[in-house]
Amino acid sequence: MSNNRVSRRQFLGYTLTGVGGFMAAGMLMPMVRFAVDPILQQHEGGDYVLTDQAVADITEEPVRVDFTFEQTDAWYKSEVTNSAWVYKEGDKLIALSPVCKHLGCTVNWAGSPEHPTQFFCPCHAGRYEKNGQNIAGTPPLGPLDEYQVKEQDGFVAIGAVRDNTLV
Amino acid sequence: MHFIGKEIDQYLNQQDYIDTVVVPLLQIDLSETGMKSSAGASEYLQNLTALLEKQFKGRILLLPPISYGKTADRQRIADELTKEVEHTKFKHVFYLTTDSEWRTLDSLKNVLWLPAIPIEDMDQSFKNSVMEDQLRQVLPLFTKEWSHHS
Ligand code: FES
């Protein structure tokens, strides 16, 4: 009977392991959450966001279309507005990401007067063709990303971002 | 780039490209009568600088707002900041503020002073368009500075 008694030393040992375990869990849990969060966010972004841009007004000339969605950063919810360059190729809608593939500035269609049929990045003069193909000799090393895009009740709806499929 | 660990890694690798530092200067007023407009100005300034960062992410490093009280010695702040930036590789420094007192100080170059617009009660899309408008006033000042000395 007395063999099963917990000695003072054992008791201390158990409690300390317990406390240590708690502390470890306390430190690990937030880390796990941080690691997992980006994956969750991507999932949320997977849905289409309806914009107020009528598909009928889209031509072959890229226009900027803004779309707003709610983003949750850990405990903080905020509205994020992103934009896409949208144009028609025949009947097909195309939406390109404005994020420069060099260091992430925002590119503009016809942003440079000398190159009215290209995307232009004001930061280091990066340039892209209309389909997003980066122009050799300018800093970007890859083509602009593409958004999934569809028509919803006559309006443009923007989906997830993916690698460029046009070039 | 934002002043956060991950983006500083990128900054350190690309210092030749990210040659501009942007410093928001923010006055904090905690008096009961001044708090509301001070907070509004803070919101406006941080909104604007966030938009600016998004536009020029690959060329600017946006610092967190340098905050100080009403009676702060702005000359001293200016001197400290100048000294801090002096030995870096940044070629251009911009200060953005809604605090008009900075206009009387001429030791700082490139102080962009903008009157704060209360944006807290605007709905999202109106706010976006107002802030875009504000941004459009600031952008050319950057591109002009860059094209002059690059
Ligand atoms: S970030 Fe676009 S060219 Fe450098």
Image (tube, rainbow, N blue to C red):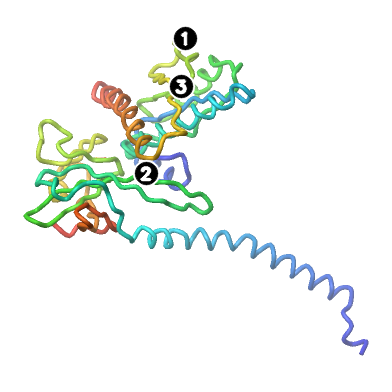
Please report whichever mark, 3 or 1, sits nearer to the chain's N-terminal start: 3
B55 up-or-down from B109: above or below = below
Q: Chain of mark 3?
A: B
Q: Secondary structure at mark 2?
A: helix
Q: Which residue is mark 1?
A: B104
- Residue closer to the observer: A127 or A130: A130
Left or right, A9 with reference to A81 = right
Query: x and y percent of residue A7 in the render?
Result: 89, 77
Residue occupying the point 19% across, 48% down: A54
Label 2–label 3 contact, CB within 8 A: no
Q: Is mark 1 within 8 Å of ligand 1?
A: no
B142 up-or-down from A39: above or below = above
Locate the C terminus of chain A and report the quarter of the image it occupies: bottom left
Q: Nearer the viewer, mark 1 or mark 2?
A: 1
> What amino acid does circle 2 point to?
Asn
- Residue closer to the observer: B14 or A131: A131
Please report whichever mark, 1 or 2, sits nearer to the chain's N-terminal start: 2
Real-space Cα separation, disc 3 to disc 1, in angstroms: 13 Å
Question: Residue A11, located in which quarter of the rendered image?
Answer: bottom right
> What amino acid does circle 3 point to?
Thr
Query: x and y percent of residue B47 in the render?
Result: 42, 34
Residue occupying the point 69% across, 65% down: A22
Locate the N terminus of chain A and report the quarter of the image it occupies: bottom right
Q: Which residue is mark 2?
A: B13
Real-space Cα separation, disc 2 to disc 3, in angstroms: 33 Å
Can you tell which mark lies on residue A123? none
Q: Nearer the viewer, mark 3 or mark 1?
A: 3
Q: Secondary structure at mark 1?
A: helix
Q: Chain of mark 1?
A: B
